[in-house]
């Protein structure tokens, strides 16, 4: 039977999911689908980026590379349906940047559905942005993590943080879901922690105040700084601060739990996209360095993101007395 083209698969995915693609050997990331610099420059000047069908026609040249890049566990139908939905907003992007962003997304096995990943436009460039759910997905894939917990504590929630207590008594969060949104109040803390496989241990609980998140944003997000300089308010830190807050907590968690090489590379690709550098160079392939080297490189690259101190909205340092249960409700205020 003839093999369907990328264009056919994307169109078919809008009505029915295709069969998962078997993973084949991924070509070296540096070659970007075999396109030469001259070919990519010609594509960037072409009119094909102005409509969805024209963009698909150009991407069709690299259909085999998407088939090879998508891991076998990823539903190719869902991936191509998400691509189809995103393309109208990406029409002004250069075809070369769109190809690189989509290939990077595919190689990490993330669907650009707005929850796990997003392909967003930065001027004339397409950028792959992994969301915090994408980081969670890769943590589970490592096989080292049994469960991941990330969330926001609102001012009206009940919560307790006692660093000196043993896990899981050191941290509890009971969302006040019975309250209205106004009564529950604004988020005051983001948290992230995970239980490791085998139930042997739980990670350290990472807590980030809004002030911590703003420090990370102001100091390290070049996309946010570019938007400010150009008088725009369309970076993810502008439009979805809470999701970026949670993602910052997850990325801090990566400093205290075992990481896979793929997760290390996702952080690098995320940083590269934020700074306007090529992301596909960081996408995983079969020639990636050993895990130990990747962990060391990641820690060195991420060390600068850690604020000097973590500012909590209020102190929770008193250990619980036996037989008693302390509750704090609705008294959290941000300093």
Image (spheres, rainbow, N blue to C red):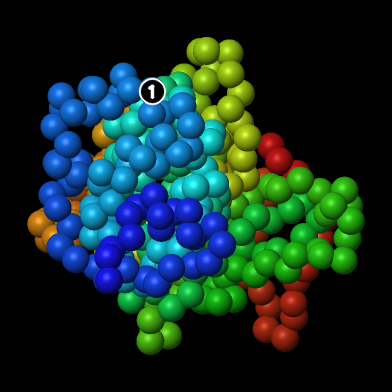
| Residue 162: image location, x then y, percent | 59, 65
Residue 233 vs residue 250, the one in the foreground: 233
Instruction: Describe residue 301's horizontal placement relative to residue 223 as left or right.
Output: left
Judging depth in this view, the residue of 332 and 53 nearest the camera is 53
Relative image position of residue 60 (x, y in whole percent): 31, 45
Q: Nearer the viewer, residue 282 or 315?
A: 282
Q: Quadrant of the N terminus?
A: bottom left
Q: Quadrant of the C terminus?
A: top right
Q: Quadrant of residue 292?
A: bottom left
Q: Is residue 191 visible?
A: yes
**Residue at image x 38%, y 81%?**
197
Q: Residue at x 81, y 65 (%)?
A: 177
Coordinates of residue 48 in the picture (x, y in percent) = 38, 29
- Vertical relation: 316 (above or below) 39: below
Image x and y of residue 117, in percent: 47, 50
Q: How many marks?
A: 1
User: Which element carries disc 1, helix, strand or loop?
Assistant: helix
Residue at 24%, 68% in the rendered image:
23
Disc 1 target residue: 47
Q: Residue at x 32, y 37 (%)?
A: 58
Residue 112 appearing in the image:
no
Neighbourhood count class around disc 1 (C-alpha, 10 Å): few under 14, some 14–19, many 20 upward = some
Check the image and name the residue furthest to the top: 230
Q: Residue 231's image quarter?
A: top right
């Amino acid at each position: 039977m003839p093999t369907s083209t990328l264009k056919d698969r994307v169109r078919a995915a809008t009505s029915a999911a295709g069969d998962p693609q078997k993973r084949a050997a991924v070509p070296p990331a540096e070659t970007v689908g075999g396109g030469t610099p001259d070919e990519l420059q010609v594509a960037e000047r072409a009119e094909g980026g102005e409509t969805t069908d024209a963009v698909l026609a150009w991407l069709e040249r690299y259909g085999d590379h998407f088939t090879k890049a998508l891991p076998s566990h990823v539903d190719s139908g869902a991936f191509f349906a998400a691509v189809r939905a995103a393309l109208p907003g990406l029409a002004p992007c250069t075809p070369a940047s769109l190809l690189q962003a989509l290939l990077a997304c595919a190689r990490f096995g993330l669907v650009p559905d707005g929850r796990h990943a997003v392909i967003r436009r930065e001027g004339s460039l397409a950028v792959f942005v992994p969301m915090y759910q994408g980081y969670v997905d890769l943590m589970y894939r490592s096989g080292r993590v049994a469960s991941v917990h990330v969330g926001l504590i609102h001012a009206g929630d009940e919560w307790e943080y006692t660093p000196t207590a043993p896990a899981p008594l050191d941290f509890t969060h009971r969302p006040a879901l019975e309250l209205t949104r106004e009564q529950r109040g604004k988020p005051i803390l983001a948290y992230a922690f995970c239980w490791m496989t085998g139930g042997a241990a739980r990670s350290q609980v990472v807590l980030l105040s809004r002030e911590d998140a703003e420090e990370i944003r102001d100091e390290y997000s070049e996309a946010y700084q570019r938007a400010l300089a150009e008088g725009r308010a369309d970076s993810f830190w502008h439009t979805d601060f809470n999701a970026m807050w949670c993602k910052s907590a997850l990325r801090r968690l990566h400093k205290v739990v075992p990481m896979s090489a793929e997760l290390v590379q996702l952080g690098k690709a995320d940083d590269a996209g934020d700074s306007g550098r090529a992301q596909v160079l960081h996408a995983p392939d079969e020639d990636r360095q050993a895990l130990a080297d990747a962990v060391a490189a990641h820690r060195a690259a991420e060390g600068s993101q850690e604020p000097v101190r973590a500012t909590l909205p209020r102190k929770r340092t008193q250990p619980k007395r036996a037989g008693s249960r302390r509750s704090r409700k609705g008294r959290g205020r941000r300093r």
